[in-house]
Amino acid sequence: MQRVEKYRRKILKEKVIEMYKIPESVQKVLDLYIDKCNKELPGLLDGLYLHGSIAIDAYLEGQSDIDFVAVTSRKLTNDDAAILKEIHWNLAETCKKPQLDGIYVQLSNQVEESYFYNEGTFGKAVHDSPVTWWLLKNNGITILGPKAKDLPIHVTTEDLTDYVRKNMNEYWVTRVKSMEKIKEQLMTYPVEHIETEMEWTVLGLLRQYYTLSERSIISKLAAGEYGLSQLEPKWHDLIREAINIRKGNSERIFATNEERVNATIHFAKELISSCKEKRVVILEGYRPKHLEELLKYELTESQLTFTSHPKVALLTCETDKGRHPVVILEKVKTAGFFVLYQGEELPSYTDNPNAILLRAYSVAVPFQGRGIAGKSLELLPEYVERNFPRVDEVVLAVNVRNEAAQRVYLRAGFKDSGRRVMGRMGEQYVYRIRVREEVMQ
C-alpha cells in the first residue's frame, strides 16, 4: 500500500507541476471544450496539448490565445468537422477571451492536411511548421493523453533552425524591403501604427535571432532582454522602446516617426545580414597551428573561476599522454576548447572503465551567444566515437554553483549521474552521456 500511495503522490505532484502554468481563464475554456467534445463526439480525443505562449511562460491575460494540438483517434469525417465547428463557434460566443486556436491531427501522419480552428475560421490545411512541433515536443503542456515529450513527433532542432532561417531570409527580407520602399509614407502614419510596426519587427526578429543562436524558443519580451545582453549598445534604445510598447509602458525614447522608422529598418537589415551567415562549427584535435589563437584566447573572470585557460591546460597535456586537447572551430576560427581525459583520475568520476572525461571546457568571449556551446556538445558523441572507438560514455564534472553551464550540458543531452566529487572550487555534479551501447573488444 505504501508503494501505491507513493506512486499516487508522484503522479499528483507531476500533474501539479504540469498544470501550474494554466491560468484560471484558460482552464475554464478547456473544461468547457473537453466536456462538449466528450458529449457530442465521445472517444474522438486521444490527446490534447498546449503550446505557444502558455508553454513558454509568455501568456498575457486578455491578449493571448490558447494554442492547442488535438490528437484524434480517427480521421475526421465531414460530420465530425461540422460538429467541431459548432463547438468552437459556441465557445467563442460563451468565452470571448481567451480564444482557442489550434489543429486536429493524427500523429501517424502529422503533416497530412487536416482541420484547424483560428479566429472564427474552421478549415483544412497542412500543419508542417517545425515551430509548432518542436515547441510541442520540448515544451508542450499535456491536458489529455500521453505526456507531450513521449509523443512520436519527428522534428529536430536543425528542422527548427532551418525553418527560422528560411523565414528570416524570405518573409522578413521582403517585409523590410517593402518598408524601405514606402519609408517616406510611413513617417506620416499615426504614431500608434509605427510603434506597432516597430514592436513587431524588432522583437519578432530578436526571437528568430535567439532561436538561431541558442537553438530554442522564447517569448518576445524575453527575446528583447536577450537582445540587450547580446547586441551592440547602439541598438539598446530601440530594443527598450520595443519592450516598452509590448508591455504597454508609456515611456518613450524616440521623439519622431522618422527616428523610429529609420532605426527599425537599419536594425532589421543588420540583424538579418548577421543571421544569413551560416555558422559552421566543427571539432578538431589540437595541432600547433592552433596555438597562436589559443594564447590570445579570452575568458571572463567568472569563467576562469570554474575552468582552466587553454594555455594552462595545454601545458598539462604535454606531460600527461592521457589528455587529448580538442579545439572548437567556427568558420576555421578557434572559438572554444576542451580536453578529453583517460587516466588514473577517471575512477573518481565513474565506475565505467570505457568512459572518457570532458574537462577544461570553454567558449571564448568573442564567440559566446552564438549557440556554439550547444552545437559543439551535440557534435561531441560523434567525435568521441570516431576517435576513441573503445569509449562508450562521456562524463564531466560541473560546479554546483555554475548553473549556466549546467543548463548548457543538460540541454545537450547530459544526465546527472548522481555522483558528486570535490573540485578546486567546491562540490561538483558528475554528468554523463552515452556514446554507443556497445564498445569494440
Image (spheres, rainbow, N blue to C red):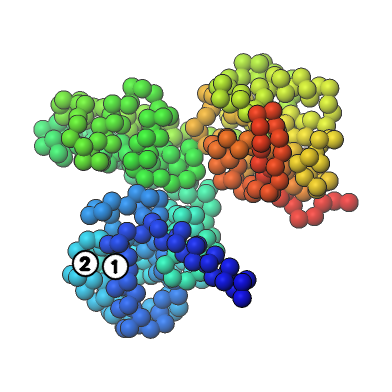
Q: Secondary structure at mark 1?
A: helix
Q: Nearer the viewer, mark 1 or mark 2?
A: 1
The reply to whether discs 1 and 2 touch (Cβ–Cβ < 8 Å) is yes
* Disc 1 to disc 2, C-alpha distance: 9 Å
Residue 282 falls in image quadrant: top right
- Place of residue 97 in the rendered image (x, y in percent of width and height, measured from the top left): 22, 61
Q: Which residue is mark 2?
A: 95
Classify 10 Å Cα crowding around label 2: few (below 14), some (14-19), many (20 and above): some
| Above-or-below relation of 440 to 199 | below
The answer to whether residue 133 shows anywhere in this view is no
Tell me what residue is drawn at x 13 percent, y 35 percent: 191
Q: Quadrant of residue 144?
A: bottom left
147 relative to 428 in the view: left or right: left
402 shown above or below 364:
below
Q: Tell me the quarter of the image containing the N terminus.
A: bottom right
Is residue 140 positioned above or below 45 on the image?
A: above
Residue with the mark numbered 1: 28
The type of residue carrying mark 1 is Lys
Judge from the rendering whether residue 395 lies leftward or rightward of residue 83; answer left or right: right
